[in-house]
Image: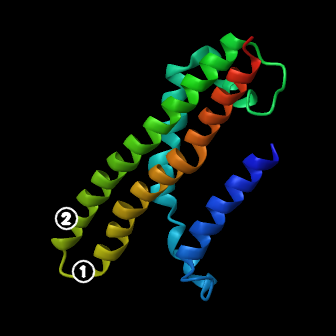
Amino acid sequence: MKLIILGLLLGVFALVFGMSANLTNLGNLKFFLEPTSFTLVFVPIVGTLLIGCRGSFISSVTSIWKRDVDNQTLDRSIQFWKAAKRYAIAYGFIGSLIGMVFTLHAFGDDDLGGVGPAIAIVVMTVYYGLISGYLVFDPIACLLEARKGVAEP
């Protein structure tokens, strides 16, 4: 468990390091908080997982920290987190298409002040999708796969 926390902390540190320009300007982090993009990525992920994994949503989430999980639950949980990764990446790109529509409409306005925020939606939805998929969901699936390998006789 300590390695998991260390790995997550290293990943988060690397992101903060890059987003803050080598830790010299932590004020830059506010540029990476985009509520529209967050909503466009995470709400559909949860909704799709609730629909697709009806009976195993809660057990897949709790299997991360539970010690006594049977192999069938581990299998479902692994599939759940792999699906979450796929959905995160897909919704990240779908959100970027929505942001692109906003961008194209902003180009039609006389005032181009809406172009920057619209492009931020384009970029940040992809960012949120990739970061959640590869820094959160995929490592959880790998953790559960490793736990299953240890549990099998």
- Residue 44 against residue 144 in the figure, above or below: below
Residue marked by disc 1? 112
The residue under the point 54% across, 67% down is 33
Task: Specify whether residue 152 is in view.
Answer: yes
Name the secondary structure under disc 2: helix
Q: Position of residue 6 (x, y in %)?
A: 75, 55
What percent of the width, then of the height, locates residue 3? 76, 48
Nearer to me, 130 or 6? 6
**Number of marks in the rendered image:** 2
**Quadrant, the N terminus:** top right
Residue 104, numbered circle? 2
Q: Is residue 151 above or below residue 7?
A: above
Label 1, residues with CA under 10 Å away: few <14, some 14-19, many ≥20? few
Which amino acid type is shown beneath numbered disc 1? Leu
Residue 94 rendering spot, x and y as whole percentages: 33, 46
Q: Residue furthest bottom?
A: 24
Q: What amino acid is labelled 2 in the image?
A: Leu
Look at the image and tell me in which quarter the C terminus lies: top right
Give the residue at x 19% y 75%.
109
The correct choice, above or below, for 79 with respect to 42 in the image is above
Q: Quadrant of residue 149?
A: top right
The alpha-carbon separation of the residues under discs 2 and 1 comes to: 11 Å
The one nearer the camera, 115 or 3, is 3
Say left or right for 80 vs 66: left
Q: Is residue 100 left or right of residue 80?
A: left
Decide if residue 141 is on the left or right side of residue 127: right
Residue 27, position in %: x, y? 60, 83
User: In the rendered image, is residue 47 in sight?
Assistant: no
Q: Residue furthest front?
A: 153
Where disc 1 sits, the SS reads helix
- Of the numbered discs 2 and 1, the one sitting upstream in the chain is 2
- In which quarter of the view is residue 53 placed? top right
